[in-house]
Amino acid sequence: MNTAHAVSTAAGLAGLEGLDSKQLLEKYRESLMGVFGTPQRVLVRGKGCTVWDADGKEYLDLLGGIAVNALGHADEFLTGIVADQLSTLGHVSNFFTSPAQIALAERLLELAGAPAGSKVFFANSGTEANEAAFKLARRNSSPTRTKIIALEGAFHGRTMGALALTAKQAYREPFEPMPGGVIHLPFGDEDALRAAVDETVAAVVLEPIQGEVGVRPLPEGFLLAAREATTAAGALLILDEVQSGVGRTGNWFAFQGNVAGGERILPDAITLAKGLGSGLPVGALLTFGAETSNLLTAGQHGTTFGGNPVATAAGLATLHAIESRGLLAHVSALGERLREQLAGIDHVVEVRGEGLLIGFDLDCDMAAAAVEAALDAGFIINSPGPRTLRLAPPLILTAEQAARFTAALPDILTTAAARTAATSKDAS
């Protein structure tokens, strides 16, 4: 018996060996909650930017686990670091620390250009990082400073604090009432922002690029306006970089590339996750400066698994690989080329994004059909809206792989348009 088979048997996977996708999906429906609906495919292995399903079909992964798999699948450097750490020390709880945790915190603060006194809190996901940020904002409150401002179109997570910051009513309504005090302003409306931010506001929470509404960057100058308004009012400026951080936009963090009026802003805090562990669950809240970093004190927040040695070792490996392989420059150049190619394709009416976080709108409500047609053609993409497609591939995506997708996309969209038209005809 080979090692892989022995591990599968010991892990209880032997009973699933040999089953096809249809059989595995039936078992999924029988054993897992239906909060995600039925998965599109059953994936069994991956390498680089390629994955294979249970039926042996090959796909080019242009979603990267929703901007998570920064180094693709089964990266040898990453898996080696993780295996080595797990064989040495896997979990210690928050009563103790480890060299990996300390080193990752120091490296993140360095890459973010954080001033003296800045700190890091490690969590397990983006929503947990945003929950910590929500509590940070609450610690900046007072009897007269109670409001938190977010934007229409925002998505910050599914736990209650993060959900209160999230704008989509369909996500919020089943769980209301939300934690109070959150106000959603019109997206990109600088005048509304300046008018709303006063001494009653504890924090403004923004995504430099809103991912879940189809990759929508903040207008030029908006972050600078937010920084000026929050500074004047004594409010915190917190940036959700869960989807846009860790090299995704061609900068380490999106706020570093969003230059407004010739100035770069420094927020009071940022949240990270997704690509930070390149597939291992790790999130982080970075607080800038001693005043903000001291808002949360001993006993006011915590986590059992956050910052564990394996996850933080994965974070260190990810950052090292991005830097040593020159992926920031690669992401910038390839993203620009890919956006240009997409803009010239029939049915595509608008292209947005930075680096390898790209959204593009179609000329009719056929995004869901396009996702299915893309799967049939061997490509994994995502539809955050009825007319919008999103790409967030591994940062190691090659120019040849990107060109293979753009060459196939016209046929994919033609197929999607025909399927959408046929469905509409049948419905009528």
Image (cartoon, rainbow, N blue to C red):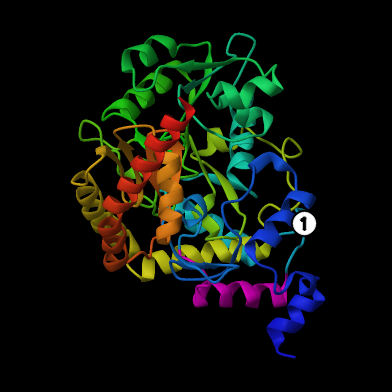
Most foreground residue, 139 or 332: 332
Q: Toward which corner of the image does residue 364 lie, by quadrant?
A: top left
Chief SS of the magenta region? helix
Q: Which residues are magenta?
A: 71-89
Quadrant in the picture for the N terminus: bottom right
Question: Callout 1, which amino acid?
Answer: Ser
186 inside magenta stretch: no
Residue 94's x, y, as percent? 75, 53
How many neighbours does mark 1 have within 10 angstroms: few (below 14), some (14-19), or many (20 or more)? some
Residue 346, image x, y percentages: 22, 43
Residue at 50 percent across and 68 percent down: it is 57
- In x, y percent, where is residue 396? 38, 65
Residue at position x 23%, y 57% from top? 333
Whole-percent x and y of residue 383?
44, 41
Q: Is residue 227 above or below residue 181?
A: below
Whether 168 is drawn above or below 271: the answer is above
Location of residue 173 by image quarter: top right
- The answer to which of 339 and 282 lies nearer the viewer is 339
For the C terminus, the quadrant is top left
Tell me the SS state at disc 1: loop
Q: Is residue 72 magenta?
A: yes
Residue 207 higher or lower than 246, as above or below: above
